[in-house]
Amino acid sequence: MIPFSIRRFLSTLPTLFVVTLIVFAIVRVLPGNPARLLLGEEATPQLVAELTHQMGLDRPLPVQYGSWLLGVLQGDFGRSIKDNMSVGKLILEKLPTTLELAALATLVSVLIALPAGIITAAKRGGFTDGLITVLALSGVSLPNFFLGILLIYLFSIQLNWIPPSGYMTPLENPLENLRLMLLPAITLGLGTAGALTRFLRGSMLEVLGQDYVRTARAKGVMGRIVLYRHALRNALIPVVTIFGLQLGGLLGGAVITEQIFSIPGFGRLIVDAVFTRDFPVVQGIVLVSAMAIFLVSFLVDLIYAAIDPRIRYR
Amino acid sequence: MSLKTVQKSKPDQAALRESESAAGQALRRFSRNRLALAGLVLIAILTVMAVFAPWLAPYDPIQQNYEALSQAPSKLHLFGTDNLGRDVLSRTIYGARVSLTAGVVAIGLATLTGLIFGMMAGFFGGVLDEIIMRVVDAMLAFPFLVLAITLAAVLGPNLQNAMLAIAVVSAPVFARLARGQVLSERERDYVQAAHALGSSDWRIVTHHLLPNIAGPIIIQASLSVAGAILAESSLSFLGLGVQPPTPSWGEMLNTARGYLRDAPWTAIAPGSLIFISVLAFNLLGDGLRDALDPKGNR
């Protein structure tokens, strides 16, 4: 297990290197001088040139990349152009909120997808199967900003149950935090629920066709027990991998969801940074989100190897 | 002479019949799939809407009318009017142009780029393969929408750049798919035979490999158009896509969000149409997968 995790980690290094190159290139190679952006339109060319020099932007690109990468490796993502705050600190401040949102959305999606996936597979080909299949695809196709707007209209404006926006940290008031996060979590989780249902259905159907399931049935084991003990347990193994794949979707979806519900997280940070052209912040967020996905898919691989004894990595 | 012709045409015809029957089988499977057909019909309706927008829309979509601000749906304005008195129905009809163009152009570009790089990687292998695939892996590591937002913002907010950003972000999936397909087809007998007969690399790629890997690519393209429509409306929703006053569904929803209490109807039409078009391409993609790849029985 340990040699495998080391090898698995080393194999991601070349890709991680390319990730840093892409993040650097997006911001530096494309037009727009950060010094000019920082000083504003009215700055004299002389002043711009001075700051350009001071920020090291007149050095050759490979040198700039090298010093940026060196900083990143030491946890220094640079400083925000807007308020000179440390980008690393800004991200650390906003990340927990987004992680909470993503975790709650995942919970919502599992609560929906687990029963839905089992029912469709158990009643394959019937009306219920067809209905859930269509609903799952609809969940995948429903834009989360439209769903968010519908939920706000229904629960905040019509029924007046939940304020349409606002945020309170779980430390300040855990109950209020959950109440305010409910609609955002549903908004973000429903699409994932659709994807998860579809995946679980496929996985269940595959397992239900296996010999050992037939053997269990032939031995006279009750249908429900076959379904849960024999089929579901094994069908859930590949489902673990989908969490790694869904994280990217959750982070992307969080950008929109946080925007609609005014949640001060990662997603709002990047939208604000994009509009103020605060590129060090954008750079930091894009890099951190890619690294988070790397980390999760790494962990998923380890978990996968741990829970499925048939898998032996060499 | 005549004997020669007969001999020559015989295997050709047999091959033709076989390929026809394979295609025919796929077509039959597809036409039996009611959901897939529903998707196709919806796409046809949306296309008609986009193409004939000037004839279908009852009003000028950007004409502001200060005597009809935020009016509820009525006989005069079936879907009501927005905060500037513009007819929501007309704007929604015109919005189909932006969404369909963005979806088809972005994914067309992504498919082409992905195919070129993916097939090169699979066909030539070696260092080229290594480099292309590392870049593909790296690009797939970014959250789709986060990378699209960043690219669209750096390039400057307009429809063209939004399409370009979506194309760049979508291309790696096609590259990986094409490479995998080429790797498995490359060793097949018919490719080896073409090699032995002295066919050029170009001919093998375009005449032998491309037709044989087209199925999975077409399926992915249909599903990706759905993703691209969603991405474009997300970018427009954030203000990084189509700029006002051009009507787009994402931008309409963003405006509607501010007037939800007084004019909720302005959100319903554009939101439903994004949903319907994304659903239509997903249904089509699912149907194509079932028809073209009966082994992957989902």
Image (cartoon, coloured by chain):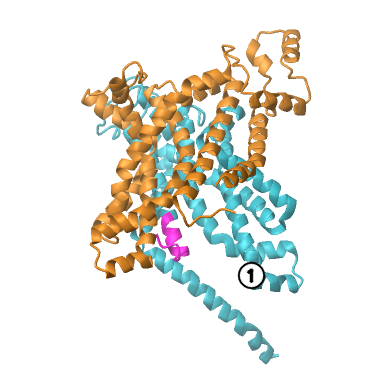
Chain colours: A orange, B cyan
Magenta stretch bounds: B286-298
Q: Position of residue A161 (x, y in %)?
A: 22, 24
Hey, which quadrant is residue B267 in on the image? top left
Q: Nearer the viewer, residue A271 or A201?
A: A201
Q: Position of residue A135 (x, y in %)?
A: 31, 48
Q: Position of residue A298 (x, y in %)?
A: 54, 42
Residue in view at x 45 percent, y 39 percent: B230
Quick one: quadrant of the N terminus of chain B?
Answer: bottom right
Label 1 amino acid? Arg
Left/right of residue B17 with respect to residue A186 in the rendered view: right
Q: Number of labelled discs?
A: 1
Q: Residues within 10 Å of mark 1 (few under 14, many from 20)?
A: few
Q: Furthest-right residue in view?
A: A60
Question: In this view of the protein, can residue B81 be seen by the observer?
Answer: no
Question: In this view of the protein, can residue B228 be seen by the observer?
Answer: yes
Q: Furthest-left residue in view?
A: A159
Residue in view at x 34 percent, y 15 percent: A172
Q: Which residue is mark 1?
A: B188
Magenta stretch contains residue B294: yes
Magenta stretch contains residue A191: no
Residue in view at x 36 percent, y 32 percent: A104
B196 to A221, vertically: above or below:
below
Quick one: quadrant of the C terminus of chain B?
Answer: bottom left
Q: Position of residue A261 (x, y in %)?
A: 37, 24
B154 to B211, vertically: above or below:
above
Q: Nearer the viewer, residue A228 or A187?
A: A228
Q: Secondary structure at mark 1?
A: loop
Q: Disc 1: which chain?
A: B
Q: Nearer the viewer, residue B191 or A102?
A: A102
Residue in view at x 29 percent, y 31 percent: A151
Left/right of residue A51 with respect to residue B234 in the rendered view: right
